């Protein structure tokens, strides 16, 4: 993964990654909205999970923290937003705020625990945190609905104007807007001194320590930021589907997003985006085409990609882009 | 059948006469557990529907009927809702059917009124589901329906102290409430009530708690699938049966495909249920023959295929009554006092609750001709849903 150190952006055009990210998301969103108007419910769900994959990328891709419990941040925020909505807070933006805060809190708590350790203990601890949250969500059924799920979430209108309906137009545009803002902010954030330092910690934490960086607080802060992003994803999912179930805190959810991240390429926001999109769209298509054996096809896709593009789908694209850029310079 | 044929042909003539394009396709979205640990029951939805279609054709009154299957996978309300939404918006289905798990059915319910789509629940067994929308009918069973006879049987068989162990979700809580209410009203005592998380795979600690409670009988419900087999195995392996603790359950716990795995130690386990594959009736014989003819394996048949078979009957009736138009009020009105003889026995839809009224049988696991079956030993006639009907 040492090739993940991207070349410094050319001076004079500092906003290029942000602008290209924004354009790409608007472009993809427009394709979704105009060409697949019947699939907006699925695309809305996809955006929620994409935020979780981006969030995971921040800790796993940029800081090298191995975690299989990342759904905790997502699920806690989804439940928080859902519960707030059931109890009377129906403004979608306020609900996003609730999710953001809940996700950040959960991120800071799990970060404080998980990043104390390295390697396998870290992985085990992340699973433990995830399982703990899942068990709590199941046990506190008076609050969360337990296995029956938390239902009856009916958010109000966005800006008091656009209501959520079955065709998911509002939900989709609302989610797309959130994704756009998050992606642009993160593009900037990962190139900030803080973001670059996290990357340095990942590449060689001993060296980082030698130059006087205290690692632990940085990782915890990064976990908090990551939790905020996951929290937005969770809140969006709660708002747009109107149901929060135990699946949102499950181990499967954590594992699945890790698979998406590795598939796309950890350590790049683009990789997280590509992995989330490709995996979910593929899964959606095969599950509809063959509801009986679709899991087998998903397995085959994963094996194929890991064999032919072990660093993720984004790696060959990046290499090509770099080569083209060099050619341009020459 | 002749009357049906007459109506169908009359409708067909009417369609032709009025110049309505008769070659339209009416789509029915079936949401079931098609993959994963509960795949057998989703497969049974398809077997039941296929059997009905094979017997009655793919056309109703000149309208083609197409069934579209989607995978609900596990208790995952968010996913089920998204799937239902997609079936309605994208595939433009006129009817929804299926729903193995209660949480999934509950999540689908709010979509029905806005989209004017009737839902035929083919499994999910919490009583209150039918109250969530006026467009829901159910052809499966409810926990109250099957549990009240279980509690009565337990009293009759001399049970004094019962330990209840149920899955910790809607239907489990219904089962616990139904058993407790009926059993205590008859003078029995519930000494232990355990709610087991759905994802549990190791039941030994639960057996230990039951042992310690001093109960003489266990009543249990878990959703059919891997947990039920695990529970019965733990009951046998932990020596409770040998110690004389009786197991009383709803039939979910001893579905026929699980019986070979439970094996001979399971002989004598009592259960109350609305359908046994070994039910002796000409309707059941021809139903099973049809499944075999369609390439299905009779050893895999469970209650969900019968619920799907009867559900398909309701859907055909609704299509016929609405002449293929989207009219949920008329569709539901057409089926809500239907009476027919199902492979499980005589049944009817209760007009007040839109839930099926049916015989519930007391069965015991027995070996007949070298094969383990649920032998029916007593019939409780025309049971309503005891929670909804307030009888």
Image (cartoon, helix red, strand yellow):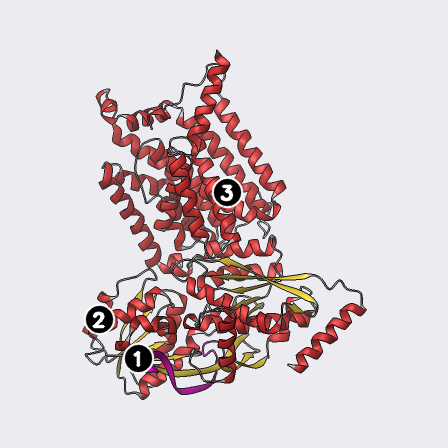
Query: Which numbered circle lies on residue B269?
Result: 1
Query: Which numbered circle lies on residue B237?
Result: 2
Query: What residue did someone put label 3 on?
Result: A93
What chain letter is assigned to the residue under label 2?
Answer: B
Residue occupying the point 39% across, 24% down = A192
Q: Would you place residue B115 above or below residue A199 in this image?
A: below
Q: Nearer the viewer, residue B162 or B263?
A: B263
Residue occupying the point 46% across, 24% down = A320
Is B367 covered by the magenta stretch?
A: yes
Query: Which numbered circle lies on residue A312?
Result: none
Location of residue A16 in the rendering, given as x and y in whole percent from the top left corner:
50, 22
Location of residue B371 in the rendering, given as x and y in whole percent from the top left corner:
34, 78
Residue occupying the point 42% across, 58% down = B74
Judged from the image, the secondary structure of the residue bearing numbered disc 2 is helix
Q: Main secondary structure of the magenta part?
A: strand
Span colored in magenta: B365-391
Q: Residues within 10 Å of mark 1 (few under 14, many from 20)?
A: some
Q: Is residue A169 left or right of residue A255?
A: right
Mark toward the start of the polypeptide (1 vs 2): 2
Nearest to viewer (mark 3 / mark 2): 2
Q: Let me know if residue B89 appears in the view.
A: yes
What chain letter is assigned to the residue under label 3?
Answer: A
Location of residue A47 in the rendering, given as x and y in whole percent from the top left corner:
49, 42
Q: Nearer the viewer, residue B174 or B288?
A: B288
Q: Which image quarter is the N terminus of chain A in?
A: top left
Is B170 covered by the magenta stretch?
A: no
Q: Residues within 10 Å of mark 3 (few under 14, many from 20)?
A: some
Q: Nearer the viewer, residue B370 or A241?
A: B370
What chain letter is assigned to the residue under label 1?
Answer: B
Marks 1 and 2 in Cβ contact (< 8 Å): no
Q: Is residue B26 left or right of residue B97?
A: right
Residue occupying the point 21% across, 21% down = A210
């Amino acid at each position: 993964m040492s090739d993940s150190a991207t070349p410094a952006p050319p001076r004079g055009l500092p906003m290029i990654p942000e602008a290209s990210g924004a354009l790409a998301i608007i472009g993809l969103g427009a394709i979704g909205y105009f060409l697949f108007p019947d699939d907006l419910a699925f695309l809305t769900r996809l955006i929620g999970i994409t935020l979780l994959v981006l969030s995971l990328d921040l800790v796993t891709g940029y800081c090298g923290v191995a975690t299989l419990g990342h759904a905790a941040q997502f699920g806690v925020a989804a439940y928080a937003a859902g519960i707030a909505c059931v109890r009377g807070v129906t403004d979608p933006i306020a609900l996003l705020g609730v999710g953001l805060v809940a996700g950040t809190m959960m991120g800071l708590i799990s970060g404080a625990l998980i990043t104390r350790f390295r390697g396998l203990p870290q992985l085990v601890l992340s699973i433990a945190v995830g399982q703990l949250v899942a068990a709590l969500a199941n046990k506190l059924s008076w609050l969360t609905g337990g296995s029956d799920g938390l239902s009856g979430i009916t958010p109000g209108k966005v800006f008091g104007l656009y209501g959520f309906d079955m065709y998911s137009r509002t939900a989709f545009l609302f989610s797309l807007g959130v994704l756009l803002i998050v992606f642009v902010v993160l593009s900037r954030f990962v190139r900030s001194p803080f973001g670059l330092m996290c990357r340095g910690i990942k590449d060689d934490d001993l060296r980082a320590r030698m130059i006087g960086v205290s690692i632990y607080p940085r990782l915890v802060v990064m976990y908090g930021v990551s939790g905020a992003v996951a929290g937005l994803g969770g809140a969006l999912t709660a708002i747009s589907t109107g149901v929060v179930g135990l699946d949102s805190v499950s181990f499967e959810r954590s594992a699945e997003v890790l698979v998406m991240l590795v598939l796309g390429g950890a350590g790049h926001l683009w990789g997280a985006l590509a992995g989330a999109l490709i995996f979910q769209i593929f899964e959606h298509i095969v599950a509809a085409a063959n509801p009986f054996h679709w899991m087998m096809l998903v397995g085959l896709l994963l094996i194929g990609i890991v064999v032919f593009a072990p660093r993720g789908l984004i790696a060959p694209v990046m290499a090509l882009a770099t080569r083209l850029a060099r050619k341009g310079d020459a | 059948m002749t009357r049906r044929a007459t109506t169908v042909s009359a409708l067909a003539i009417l369609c032709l006469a009025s110049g309505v394009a008769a070659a339209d396709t009416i789509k029915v979205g079936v949401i079931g557990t098609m993959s994963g640990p509960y795949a057998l029951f989703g497969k049974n939805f398809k077997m039941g529907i296929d059997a009905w279609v094979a017997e009655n054709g793919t056309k109703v009154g000149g309208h083609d009927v197409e069934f579209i299957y989607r995978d609900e996978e596990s208790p995952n309300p968010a996913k089920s809702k998204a799937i239902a939404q997609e079936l309605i918006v994208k595939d433009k289905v006129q009817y929804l059917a299926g729903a193995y798990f209660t949480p999934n059915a509950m999540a689908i319910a709010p979509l029905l009124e806005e989209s004017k789509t009737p839902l035929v629940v083919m499994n999910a067994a919490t009583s209150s589901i039918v109250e969530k929308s006026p467009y829901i009918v159910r052809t499966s069973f409810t926990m109250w329906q099957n549990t009240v006879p279980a509690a009565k049987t337990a009293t009759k068989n001399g049970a004094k102290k019962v330990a209840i162990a149920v899955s910790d979700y809607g239907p489990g809580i219904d089962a616990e409430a139904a058993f407790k209410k009926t059993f205590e009203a008859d003078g029995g005592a519930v000494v232990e009530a355990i709610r087991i998380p759905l994802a549990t795979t190791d039941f030994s600690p639960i057996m230990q708690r039951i042992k310690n409670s001093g109960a003489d009988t266990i009543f249990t419900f878990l959703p059919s699938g891997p947990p039920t087999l695990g529970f019965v195995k733990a009951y046998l392996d932990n020596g409770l049966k040998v110690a004389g603790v009786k197991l009383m359950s709803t039939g979910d716990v001893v579905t026929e495909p699980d019986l070979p795995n439970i094996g001979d130690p399971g002989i004598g386990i009592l259960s109350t249920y609305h359908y046994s594959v070994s039910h002796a009736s000409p309707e059941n014989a021809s139903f099973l023959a049809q499944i075999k003819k369609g390439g299905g394996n009779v050893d895999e048949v469970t209650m969900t295929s019968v619920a799907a078979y009867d559900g398909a009957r309701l859907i055909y009736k609704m299509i016929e009554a609405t002449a293929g138009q989207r009219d949920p009020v008329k569709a539901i009105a057409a089926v809500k006092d239907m009476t027919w003889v199902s492979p499980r026995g005589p049944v009817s839809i209760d007009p007040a609750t839109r839930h099926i009224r049916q015989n519930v049988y007391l069965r015991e696991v027995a070996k007949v001709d070298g094969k383990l079956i649920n032998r029916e030993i007593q019939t409780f006639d025309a049971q309503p849903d005891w929670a909804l009907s307030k009888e």
